[in-house]
Every structure is written in C-alpha cells, then in structure tokens.
Image: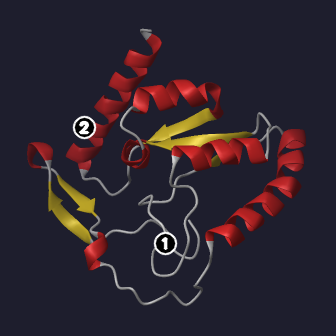
Amino acid sequence: MTDFNWLRTRTDTPSRGGSVVTSFDYADVTSEPTEGGPISEERLWETLTHFLERVVPVAEKAGVKLSMHPDDPPLSPIRGVGRIMRSIDNYQRLIETAPSAVNTITLCQGNFTLMTDDLPAVIRKFGKKITFVHAHAGYSSFGRLYAIGYIRGLREAVYAG
C-alpha cells in the first residue's frame, strides 16, 4: 500500500452480532492529493518489478517467502495514489512478474471478497501461492471471531472438494 496504509472513513460501524467494525465510504474521502502523490499505477508496477528483480533471488537463497497484501480498500486511485494490488488480474500479473516459489500472496479475506464474486475459485486458482490468510485488523473481538469462523469454513469447503 503505497504512500499510506489501509484506509477507513469510520471506526464505529455496527455489524453482525452486535460487533463494531471499521468501514470505508469513497464519498467521504477527500480528493486532495497526498503529500507523496500523485503516483501512477504504471510507476507502481515499474517500482514493484524493480524491487522483485532484486529481492526475489535473495529471498530464494535465504528461504524467505514474500507475501503481497492487497491494497485496502482495493480501489484506485485514492487521493492521487494509484493502487495495483486491487484485482485478481493484478495478482496474476504479480505472480507472472516474478515466477518464483517465494513470491506469494496474502489472502486478506475482506479485500479478496471485494475483488471477486467467487472467493473459493480464487483460492483454488492461486492454490499454493497463498501462504498467509487473515481478516481485517480493524474488527472488534466479535468481528474477528466471525472472520475466523468464515476462514475455517472456506478452508473446509476448499479441501472438501
């Protein structure tokens, strides 16, 4: 996530079971560019490619996996900053940019759900390239419990065939 971390416009949105979650409404985001912006998607791909070309060989030698987290939320641009880890196609491009076992994916349940209508198919598509799974940190305890249950259900559905 270039120039700023994950972004929310509210931190007190009521949700299931009485939980409180963070939320994002694009209409509430200022259009004023960030201090570091504007940054184009093309520039981000160039920079990411440059980074991967240099870091992947070192990670391979060290036995370290790199795991790319999606932009959160997966929208582009936000405040003049392009965001490239926001679609299934762009994740495919990431994998093809550096075809290595150490170039992997963080499956952030919330963001990948926003990228597709068929999350189990995406999980099957990327398979072993997914090396880390989690739910958004912005959830309350009840929200996290729900998300963990959802992740377990997805796992069971995938492995059940």
Q: Position of residue 7 (x, y in %)?
A: 40, 69
Q: Quadrant of residue 12?
A: bottom left
In the picture shown, does residue 57 fall above or below 5?
above
In the picture shown, does residue 111 fall above or below 32?
above
Rounded to the nearest angstrom, the CA distance separating label 2 from label 1 is 30 Å
* Residue positioned 37% across, 48% down in the render: 114
Q: Is residue 129 left or right of residue 22?
A: right
Q: Quadrant of residue 74?
A: bottom left
Which residue is disc 2 drawn over?
Answer: 146
Which tag, 2 or 1, sits closer to the chain's start? 1
Q: Position of residue 36 (x, y in %)?
A: 59, 86
Which residue is disc 1 drawn over?
Answer: 77
* Residue positioned 31% across, 71% down in the render: 26
Q: Amino acid at mark 2?
A: Tyr
Nearer-the-camera pick, 63 or 98: 98
Residue 43 badge: none
Q: Position of residue 27 (x, y in %)?
A: 26, 75
Q: Position of residue 109 (x, y in %)?
A: 40, 42
Q: Residues within 10 Å of mark 1 (few under 14, many from 20)?
A: some
Q: Quadrant of residue 125?
A: top right
Q: Nearer the viewer, mark 2 or mark 1?
A: 1
* Residue positioned 42% across, 9% down in the render: 160
Q: Quadrant of the C terminus?
A: top left
From this viewpoint, is residue 41 visible? Answer: yes
Q: Is residue 73 left or right of residue 145?
A: right
Which residue extends farthest top? Answer: 161
Q: Quadrant of the N terminus?
A: bottom right
In the picture shown, does residue 35 fall above or below 13?
below
* Residue positioned 46% across, 26% down in the render: 121
